[in-house]
Amino acid sequence: MTSLILATSDLASYRLRQAGRADIVVGLRPRFVWGQMPSSAELTRLLAPRSASHADFDTHWLDFASARWLGSIGNDVGLVELCEHCEDIELWADPQPNDQLVLFWLLDVLRPHRHIVSKLSLVQTDVEIARYRGESSAKWRLPALTVADDRLELASRAWNAYRAPTPEPCFDLLMQDLSAIPRLRAALIALLEELPGCDTGLGATELRMLDLVSEGETRPRNLSSELHRERGVFDLEEAELVLDRLAYCQTPVISGFPAEMEGPGDAKARQERLLHSRLSTTDFGEEVLEHRLDFSQYDPIHRWWGGTELTNDRLWRWDTESRALIAP
């Protein structure tokens, strides 16, 4: 009997493979918390059996999976085909928002395949799996939850809500019973907190980053690591891009980087900048931090939150104190 673990991140799959938790362990790599959402066609192609449409690297879900990890099955199969080769399938999900989004996506994809759902279970961790060595996670005894219709239906609703053109469907979910997916409510709140704040125009990670610099954390790499540990919404690379957004803008809230950003292909210069720069808040940054000025009134905003395109003219906001969504 072949056992399969589908993990909601590549790093988690590495640790679970170390632990020998299943015959086959595969991690999913999409990052849904940053940038524009992939189209339905792109997501379908990603999980399909390998074909001519996967000529470019990182367009097939198993491009980063060694063929030896999958044995005779190989790494050209699609998600459904791999699941059909296995008799026992577990979905292991970290609590971080992106991992929860990957979980919703996978459950939504597998929902029509009843013969796969019948051998599927959900293992929801309370901690980030990648933080623990394989010998540690090998000893974990976590409950495997049956993937019943209520979980499938809720996962599909959450997935479609996040991809909607406004945050309203996600906010509306908070008024409903979400107990079928234990970490859904916390993930939704963490994501909604990343919308521009009602007073500052900054999301929770941006505002906390500004706060840490004001408190004396001057090293960019330390800052990104701390934000990843505290908030868990963005990975280290994404946190560095958040920092760039605050420093390289019309009216910066953070200073200390070179006057001009390096070119997109200059990895060495970027590494030097992130290792050796020392940061501080600008006067404007202190005013924003004290909720006296609004970042969006001085700087252009254009970013994505799920399926919602945020601009200065179409700025959905989040009121953290009252947990209320504010329409443009």
Image: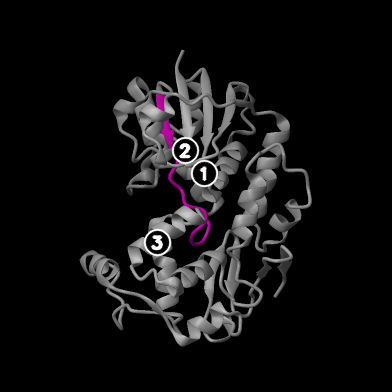
Front residue of 281/233: it is 281
Give the quadrant of residue 225. Answer: bottom left
Q: What element carries label 1?
A: helix
Q: Residue 171 carries which label?
A: none
Give the quadrant of residue 250. Answer: bottom left
Q: What residue type is labelled 3?
A: Ser
Mark 1 residue crowding within 10 angstroms, few (<14) / some (14–19) / many (20+): few
Q: Residue 44 carries which label?
A: 1
Q: Residue 48 carries which label?
A: 2
**Principal secondary structure, stretch drawn in magenta:** loop
Query: Does 157 lie within the magenta span?
Result: no
* Residue numbers of the magenta segment: 24-38
In the rendered image, the residue lying farthest to the left is 268
Mark 3 residue crowding within 10 angstroms, few (<14) / some (14–19) / many (20+): many
Return the residue at label 3. Answer: 224
The residue at 28%/73% (across/down) is 277
Q: What is the C-alpha distance between the residues marked 3 and 2?
A: 34 Å
Residue 33: x and y in percent read: 52, 56
